[in-house]
Image (tube, helix red, strand yellow):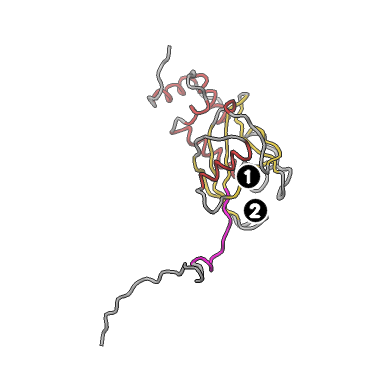
Amino acid sequence: METHEAMSRRVPETKEGAEPALAGHPKPSVTVDIILFTIRDDDLKVLLVERKHDPFAGKWAIPGGFVEIDESLEAAALRELKEETNVGDIYLEQLYTFGDPDRDPRGRVISVAYFALVSSDDFDLKADSDAADVRWFSMFDLPPLAFDHDKVLSYALVRLRNKLEYTTVGFQLLPRKFTLSQLQQVYEVILQKKLDKRNFRKKILSLDVLRETG
């Protein structure tokens, strides 16, 4: 005889004293890395910190650190950036998640990378926390880097170059008032190539986001 019993999905126990719902799953650590780009001395610069502790003590690295259990990814990124470089109150855009199993010698660590474009004159850089030093480096002449940060920066540069094609991201590297020649120079520095002046101006003006200031 067919019976019709009410069925429901089993909910994992999470009460005190019961086996935690995630007890059977591995627990990788999560970090955030923050890539800051600027234009300085006609060059694309990236902000790096010198690591004070192992692993990779003495090596240069992207600012970042571990996410606390009770904070969001973005909050962790802003906190780590402030702690290690004294840079704060900026808009961060999530870039990519890097999760190769062997990317960190300490164990299984997944890193969520963020990036931003800033004016290098806006901040009073100061190494703090676990950073021995903080400095701007040319993206095209980097020192040996810790972890997989060479891969992270290569990915960030590709993303930045791609965004130049369809956004006004390059404007963030200039003062509020600027000339088209200054803007073209920013593009040429990032792309590492000369651009035709007339074609560049035609492309930028077609975006209809600029106005003459006289």
| Span of residues in magenta | 21-31
**Residue linked to disc 2:** 104
Mark 1 — residue? 149
Q: Residue at x 59, y 50 (%)?
A: 66
- In the image, 203 versus 144, the foreground residue is 144
Examine the rendered structure and indicate whether residue 37 appears above or below residue 112: above
Residue 124, given in percent of the width and then of the height, sits at 62, 29
User: Magenta span: helix, strand or loop, mainly?
Assistant: loop
Q: To which quarter of the image does residue 113 belong?
A: top right
On screen, residue 188 above or below 92: above
Considering every residue shown, the one lying at the far right of the view is 58
Residue type, numbered disc 2: Asp
Q: Which comes sooner in the sequence, label 2 or label 1?
A: 2
| SS type, badge 2 | loop
Q: Quadrant of residue 6?
A: bottom left
Quadrant holding the C terminus: top left
User: Magenta span has 214?
Assistant: no
